[in-house]
Amino acid sequence: MKAAWLAVLAGCGAASATRPPPVDPEPVHSALADEDLFKPSYGKPELQKALIAERGAEATGERRVSELEAKPGDLAVDDQLRVAAADLAVRRRFIQTLEACQAAGRFCPPRLDEPAWAFDPDPDRPTEPPMTAILRFDLDSWRNLAAELHGRACACRTIACVDSVGVAIDLLEVRPMPQVQSDDASSTSVTRARECLFRLRGKAPIPTTAPDGDGVSFVLDAASEVVAKSLN
């Protein structure tokens, strides 16, 4: 497996040269076979506008990390740096998915906005995830919930969002009755949500355009290098 990835990276040339390999790559989850069947509601103009906004947010995140790196180290600063670096890494991966969507129509998130999400799971004080869809678990309601989980997972730009949406999926997925849990549409939405979270954690390849613009190459994400640097 490692030899195969090294061969892929070598073939990516300049496309991967700007981002070093991840510090501790994990086994890669395969993308859904029917990924291309998902068609988002937005068009190319909205996608281009989102990319411009996200690259501006990325620059802001880079400045934040640089400012924290320049401060004298202490526990508070180190903690802020870890969070800022992790958030920057997630946003960079989100940008990569938008670029893949723009280049080849793959891995497009269901939504481009960043929906409000404040969920701090506490096992001692369990609370319901703040979903917009009604928390009922009959067939129609579970399909709506699963679709919302898909949209929220793929729209994450911070590590807190990635972590807490993952917890929300774990909490909600077990609640429908068995005959509802086996619904294909709901299962597909939940699977796609988990795939998005896996990519945003940097544990799956994200496609990027090849240097000559011909086709799409899959390269290992390397935004986690920022996280690793903050932990050293």
Image (cartoon, rainbow, N blue to C red):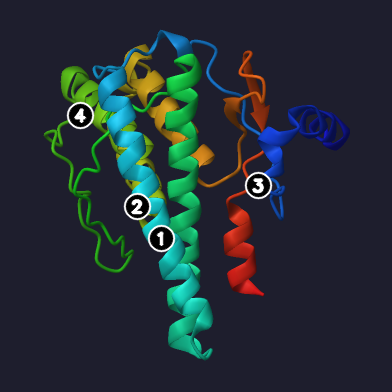
> Quick check: marks 1 and 2 in contact, CB under 8 Å?
yes
Residue at 46 percent across and 61 percent down: it is 62
Give the mark nearer the N terminus: 4 vs 1: 1
Q: 203 above or below 107?
A: below
- Residues 172 and 2: in front is 2
Judging from the image, what secondary structure is the residue with disc 1 in? helix
Q: What amino acid is labelled 3 in the image?
A: Arg
Q: Report the disc number at residue 137.
A: 4
> Quick check: marks 3 and 2 in contact, CB under 8 Å?
no
In this rendering, the label closer to the viewer, 2 or 4: 2
Residue at which label 3 appears: 19
Q: Report the disc number at residue 61.
A: 1
Q: What amino acid is labelled 1 in the image?
A: Gly
Q: Residue 159 in the image: x percent, y percent?
A: 42, 55
Residue 83 visible from this viewpoint: no
Alpha carbon distance from label 4 to label 3:
43 Å
Quarter of the image for residue 232 reads bottom right
